[in-house]
Image: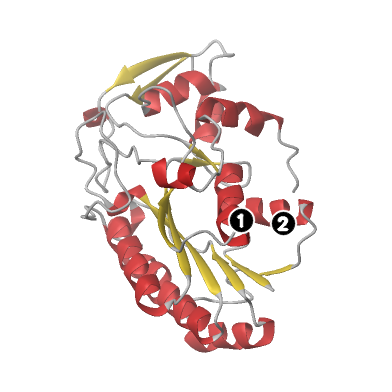
Amino acid sequence: MILITGANGQLGTELRYLLDERNEEYVAVDVAEMDITNAEMVDKVFSEVKPTLVYHCAAYTAVDAAEDEGKELDYAINVTGTENVAKAAAKYDATLVYISTDYVFDGEKPVGEEWEVDDTPDPQTEYGRTKRMGEELVEKYAKKFYIIRTAWVFGNYGKNFVFTMQNLAKTHDTLTVVNDQHGRPTWTRTLAEFMVYLAENQKEFGYYHLSNDADEDTTWYDFAVEILKDTNVTVKPVDSSQFPAKAKRPLNSTMSLAKAKATGFVIPSWKDALKEFYKQDVKK
């Protein structure tokens, strides 16, 4: 049986619809059904479901809030919660798929270079720190695991950059977007498909990086221009100093996709993914 945590979130929802399309059985839980910060509750659900595969989508992702008012919750979900899930996965001999982030790196690699799977993590934010601790706990406790780092996630089932730009475009003629933060967008559908692909094809356990592909270097500005290309909104590039934030943003989030591609998984470009995203039949 498959167990999905964080089933009502942006990725968890996408994953449920993907498994529905494939007529696969699963048990989907969110905080009401299984509070991952409660070890007893986690063990109770695992004992009832007896999963052989766990997609651990539950996470605290409010990057700025994690620096202060959300700090305790960030730790509780991303560290304690992940530890509880990893221990339970080991106890019931389940394969664990854990979603991590580019924020585990310092983001300072020169533009044009890519973060490799085995590069040394050096998180610069509370969110990055707790996600890295989650990675370490998965490695420590889970016997069979996939850790997938991703970045710049967008999809139809949650708040994300695409919806933010579209909403701002309704009330603004001109938008300013940073052009000195480099990376690649990731469509939740592509990420969900990769998660399923690794598990079902029993690919080598370990770390992977997954975003949508790109032929050229991409910034948030480039992403915004593509999102709004069919509107009358002017998008102007600015540097990060114009958008001060509590949490330090990586200047280079671009991760190498070589290991993911070597599995045989075909990764669409982010521009193609964005087109497909617009066509997606949104199920509410």
Query: As drawn, is 108 to the left or to the right of 162?
Result: left
At x 20% / y 55%, what residue is drawn?
122
Mark 2 crowdedness (10 Å alpha carbons): few <14, some 14-19, many ≥20: some
Task: Tell which of 257 and 183 is nearer to you.
Answer: 257
Location of residue 256 by image quarter: top left
Q: Amino acid at mark 2?
A: Leu
Residue 200 in view here: yes
Q: How many marks?
A: 2
Foreground residue among 46 and 143: 143
Rendered-image quadrant of the N terminus = bottom right
Quadrant of residue 43 within the rendered picture: bottom right
Please identify, in this view, whether the residue under mark 1 or under mark 2 is nearer the observer: 1
Look at 76% across and 62% down and name the residue there.
Answer: 24
Q: Position of residue 115 (x, y in %)?
A: 29, 43
Residue that carries the numbered disc 2 in the rendered image: 19
**Residue beneath label 1, please?**
196
Please report contact status of discs 1 and 2: CB closer than 8 Å, yes or no. Answer: yes
In the image shown, does 204 or 22 lie closer to the viewer?
A: 204
Residue at left offset 46%, top offset 18%: 225
The residue sitting at 45% across, 77% down in the picture is 143
Note whether residue 210 is visible: no
Looking at the picture, how far across and down is residue 140, in whole percent? Answer: 35, 77
Under mark 1, the amino acid is Val
Above or below for 81 versus 126: below
